[in-house]
Amino acid sequence: MNKITTIILISLISAQSMADCQPVTYLNVGDKAVCEGYIFTKAAESDNRAKLDKLDLDIKLIDAQNQDIDILKKRVDLYKEAYKQNDLEKYLYFFGGMLITYGVLRLATQVNQK
């Protein structure tokens, strides 16, 4: 019976002490900490906040750069497609010029034979 009572009391005491534990608690000099964790000086807290702010800015910068990269990739794809179309036009003009030249030479040989 004593074991059960002891277990119940321990669980109630530990549950109560965990209920007082908050993510951020301000402590004065000489205060007793109610839970485990780290204690930061104001300078260290300011430093950590500055690092977190810089990290947030870096993440936003990376997102913006990724958007720029996506836009540039789309532009490159468009230029490649336009270049392929220009190649097709070049080939068509080249073969069209060859056909016209062949037609002119054929006409010239027929005129010279008469």
Image (cartoon, rainbow, N blue to C red):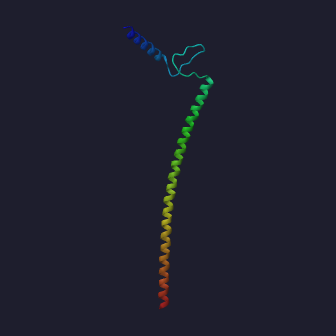
- State whether residue 37 is above or below residue 7: below
Question: Residue 21 appears at what percent x and percent y?
Answer: 49, 18
Taking the image as shown, residue 74 lies to the left or right of residue 5, namely: right
| The N terminus, quarter of image | top left
Give the camera-side residue of 57 and 35.
35
Question: Residue 6 appears at what percent x and percent y?
Answer: 41, 10
- State whether residue 2 is above or below residue 81: above
Question: Residue 30 appears at what percent x and percent y?
Answer: 59, 13
Residue positioned most to the bottom: 114
Residue at left offset 49%, top offset 67%: 89
Place residue 53 in its image quadrant: top right
Place residue 51 in its image quadrant: top right
Place residue 25 in its image quadrant: top right
Question: Residue 22 appears at what percent x and percent y?
Answer: 50, 20
Residue at left offset 47%, top offset 83%: 106
Residue at left offset 56%, top offset 40%: 61
Give the camera-side residue of 8 and 74.
8
Residue positioned most to the top: 2
